[in-house]
Image (cartoon, rainbow, N blue to C red):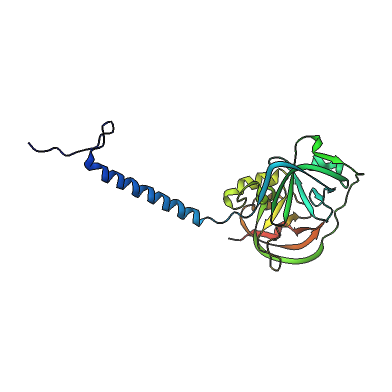
Amino acid sequence: MRESTPMYVGYLPLPQRCKGAVLGAAAMVLLGAAALAGGLAASQRHPGDAVWDIAAERSWSGTLVLEPYPMLVDSEGVGWFVVGIGKFGVHDRLAGFDGGAVTVRGYALQREHRRMIELGPGAGAIELVGDAGASTAPPLSNVREVAFVGEIVDGKCYLGAMKPGDGKAHKACATLCIEGGLPPLVAGEIPGAGGLYPLLRVDGHSVLPSEVLALVGEPVRIRGRLGEINGLPVLDIKAGDVEPAG
């Protein structure tokens, strides 16, 4: 009588003669998957050294100014952007503190030399410790003309809330964030200055017009006047000074 050929049935024990083939095939699949995952991971660019410290609330003191964007200017003259929780700015919430000495509480975001405070919830997150009065943004200092290829990004995600916080995959999120009042920054290598991540102002305002907002998250050619206000790099342009780079 001829011996029957062994076969695998899921609810029966695996025949001895089939074990080697099955285990070998499983090992090959696992090795292939590991190699594919490693290759994909190695091909991804580094998201940067952005940090969002949400582990503990901190306090900062300084002078609050609303222009060119709400920020806390510390004792060293460095401006920290101040934003709200989620995809929102805090312009209205800080209006009564303009020009005043304040203490604020919240969470730090930082990418290299650019810093931001996510203001904590509740009225107690900001306290006036000196007289307030409307401040006026000084004019740009150390001004020079620049032209380069970069990307308009929303400051909060790019400084640490997202990794990475740029590129076309992040375009919809960045657009919503900037529309909600978060600071538009420009990421790119500026000739002679490197990656400053300056605040973008179009026709003197950090609220972007629709034709510039449509270019957020895209490679763009941009030209304008680069300078400083309260130690913060600011890039002033006109709406026609930015165009798709591709």
Q: Is residue 114 above or below residue 92?
A: below
Q: Is residue 213 visible?
A: no
- For the N terminus, give its image quadrant: top left
Q: Give the quarter of the image for residue 126.
A: top right
List x then y, in percent, for residue 145.
75, 66
Q: Is residue 100 left or right of residue 210?
A: right
Image point (26%, 45%), residue name? 20
List x then y, in percent, for residue 182.
72, 46
Q: Give the quarter of the image for residue 202.
A: bottom right
Furthest-bottom residue in this view: 192
Q: Nearer the viewer, residue 82 or 58?
A: 58
List x then y, in percent, for residue 47.
59, 54
Furthest-left residue in this view: 1
Image point (66%, 54%), residue name? 152
Furthest-top residue in this view: 11
Q: Is residue 228 left or right of residue 243?
A: right
Q: Is residue 118 left or right of residue 17?
A: right
- For the C terminus, give its image quadrant: bottom right
Image point (86%, 57%), residue name? 138
- What is the number of callouts on the image? 0
Q: Nearer the viewer, residue 50 or 231?
A: 50
Furthest-right residue in this view: 131
Q: Nearer the viewer, residue 164 or 169?
A: 164
Q: Nearer the viewer, residue 80 or 191?
A: 80
Q: Is residue 199 visible?
A: yes
Q: Is residue 16 left or right of residue 177?
A: left
Q: Is residue 145 above or below residue 214?
A: below
